[in-house]
Image (cartoon, rainbow, N blue to C red):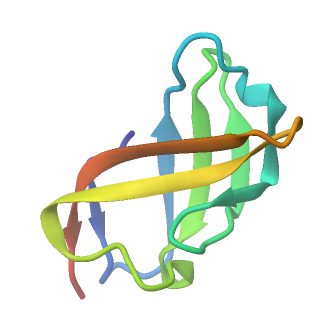
Amino acid sequence: MDPQALNLGSHGEFTITISLNSGYDPNLILAASVRAYGAAPLSFKVKGNGDLMIKFNRDDLVGGPPVGDSVPFIVTGLYQDGSVFQGWDYIKVLGE
C-alpha cells in the first residue's frame, strides 16, 4: 500500500494505492462497500495494471488509526458475490 506514511494533522484528502494478489479481480469489488477505519471512499478507481486507487478524507477516519511507526492500516469491502475483501499494510501514522 502506498503511501507508507499518513499525517492525521494534514486535514483533507489522501489517496492510497493497493495491489491485489493475483487471481483477485479488482473490478468485482463493490466500491460503495469499501471502508478504512469507518471512512467511505471519496473515489475508487481501478488502474490499468489492476491496482486500486482509493481516495479518503482524513477527517472521516473514525477512531484510528493510532499514531505510531508501524500501524496496520486496514481496508475492507465486499466483492459482488458477497465475499469479503480485506487488505492491510503497516504504515507510519503521524499525529495532529
The x, y position of residue 12, in whole percent, is 50, 77
Residue at the outermost left position: 69
Tally of numbered discs: 0
- Residue sticking out furthest to the right: 81
Quadrant containing the C terminus in the rendered view:
bottom left
Indicate whether 38 appears above or below 86: below
Task: Give the quadrant of the N terminus.
Answer: top left
Answer with left or right where residue 37 lies relative to residue 43.
left
Return the residue nearer the eye: 45 or 24: 24
Q: Which image quadrant is residue 38 in?
A: bottom right
Give x and y (percent) for residue 77. Answer: 69, 51
Could you tell me which residue is drawn at 49 percent across and 27 percent down? 19
Residue 33, position as x, y percentages in the image: 77, 57
Q: Does residue 93 show up?
A: yes
**Can you give x and y, in whole percent of width and height, for residue 23 in the image?**
64, 11
Relative side of 88 to 20, left or right: left
Q: Residue at x 60, y 49 (%)?
A: 54
- In this rendering, the answer to whether 62 lies above or below 30 is below
Residue at position x 67%, y 62% from top?
A: 41
In the figure, residue 95 lies in which quadrant? bottom left
Residue 63: quarter of image: bottom left
Residue reaching furthest to the front = 83
For residue 38, above or below residue 53: below
Can residue 3 be spotted in the picture? no
Q: Nearer the viewer, residue 36 or 2?
A: 36
Residue placed most toward the observer, 68 or 56: 68
Residue 10 appears left or right of 18: left
